[in-house]
Amino acid sequence: MKKTFIFLCSSLFIFFSSACNASSNLTSSVSEITTTKSHNTITDEEAREIVVNKIGDDNGNRIIEIDGNKIEDNGKFYYKIHAYSLSPTMIGWDENGNTHPYQQTFTYGWFYVDTIDGTIYIEETITDNNGNTQVNLIEYQ
């Protein structure tokens, strides 16, 4: 009876010890993934600030905002940033002759910011002799 009790206690000890170690290893792995991710990516707001610092905001007249979610191109992820300004409010007429106020949008550019290193890219459109068009991202200078 005493041997059975000692065997049972030993077995339970080994079982719970290995379960705790497995839990500890899992927690460690999740922590490493989270730490790696947080150190290797920039936020969408940081991407917007990178563009503002590079092109300026034209004394507050240029609107620079994130356009949607991250996009992927050839396995790399980017934030798409739109820089534009608005005209003063003007009066226009519809097809019935009624007047209404409106503003025009003047796009300065679309910028793609690498989510890992913050490098800014712009689109370059290339058309070959056969009329085929290809869009590439090139680094913004």
Image: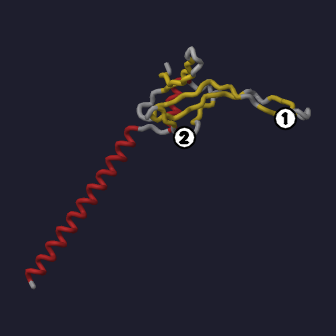
Measure how far apart labels 1 and 2 are at the Cα level. 33 Å
Residue 54 in the image: x percent, y percent?
51, 24
In the image, taking residue 23 as reference, residue 119 lies left or right, namely right
- Residue 40 sits in which quadrant? top left
Q: Secondary structure at mark 1?
A: strand
Farthest top residue in view: 129
Tally of numbered tags: 2
Return the x and y of residue 134 as percentages of the image width and height: 54, 23
Q: Which residue is the site of mark 1?
A: 100
Q: Nearer the viewer, mark 1 or mark 2?
A: 2
Q: Amino acid at mark 2?
A: Asn
Q: Classify 10 Å Cα crowding around label 2: few (below 14), some (14-19), many (20 and above).
A: few
Q: Which mark is residue 69?
A: 2
Q: Could you tell me which residue is drawn at 13 percent across and 80 percent down?
A: 5
Q: Residue at x 81, y 28 (%)?
A: 90
Image quarter of the N terminus: bottom left
Residue 129, image x and y in percent? 57, 14
Identify the secondary structure beneath mark 2. Answer: loop
133 with respect to 114 (left or right): right
Residue at 11 percent of width and 81 percent of height: 4
Where 90 sits versus 29, above or below?
above
Q: Residues within 10 Å of mark 1 (few under 14, many from 20)?
A: few
Vertically, is 22 above or below 80? Answer: below
Q: Quadrant of residue 64?
A: top right
Question: Is the residue 43 above or below the residue 135 in the image?
Answer: below
- Seen at 49% across and 22% down, the residue is 138
Q: Earlier in the sequence, mark 1 or mark 2?
A: 2
Q: Which amino acid lies under the numbered mark 1 shown in the image of this protein?
A: His
Which of 56/98 is in front?
A: 98
Give the farthest residue toward the front. 130
